Image (cartoon, rainbow, N blue to C red):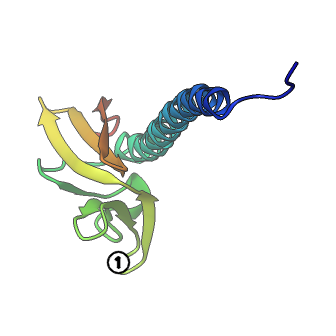
Amino acid sequence: MKKGLTLVEILISMLILSFIMAGIFAILNIGNSTWNRDMALLELQQNTRLALSGMISEIRQANVLPAAGTSITFTMPSDIAVNPIIYRRDAATNRIIREHPAGVTKIIANNIYSLNFTPIGTKVIKIDIIARKTIGSNVIDFPMSEQVKLRNVN
């Protein structure tokens, strides 16, 4: 009686093992890409919500209803016409920038594709933000919109 395996048996075993390994790697690759996409979306959500929250709390206290557009300039009751606050999107870096006082800037959010301010009536401003990030060949968008009622406008 012969002991051992033939060459054909070994080749068939290796083929079956390679199919199993390819399946495992495909599942791991799908899991990894899903994880990366979800982490990017989570980062966009947190970044956008934090930026919007800060803008809302300041804009709510504005003295006058600012004009519509991609940037907003307003003053606080304590700084009437002395030190305006400016929020704008820097198109070159896709960031929201806060400028106050003049010449002093702070980055509020990254990966911002679009930022718009629209007055609604005489006491409300609508803020629309679209955050965008590219992971591999996937583009992830996170839109967010909020209406702010101004407290100091008659």
Left or right: where 47 falls relative to 96: right
Is residue 96 visible from the viewing direction of this image? Answer: yes
Can you give x and y, in whole percent of width and height, for residue 27 in the image? 54, 28
Tell me if residue 44 comes above or below residue 84 in the rendering: above
Tell me if residue 11 comes above or below residue 97 in the rendering: above
Which residue appears at 35% of the width and 34% of the height? 151
Which residue is under mark 1? 102
Crowding around mark 1 (Cα neighbors within 10 Å: few <14, some 14 to 19, many 20+) is few
Instruction: Report which quarter residue 37 is drawn in.
Output: top left
How many marks can you see?
1
Q: Residue furthest top?
A: 1
Can you give x and y, in whole percent of width and height, for residue 26 in the image? 50, 32
Q: Residue furthest front?
A: 1
Toward the viewer: 82 or 84? Answer: 84
Toward the viewer: 141 or 73? Answer: 141
Can you give x and y, in whole percent of width and height, for residue 64 in the image? 22, 48
Left or right: where 67 falls relative to 47: left
Which residue appears at 55% of the width and 38% of the height? 32
Left or right: where 3 falls relative to 45: right
Is residue 154 visible from the viewing direction of this image? Answer: no
Which residue appears at 56% of the width and 31% of the height? 15
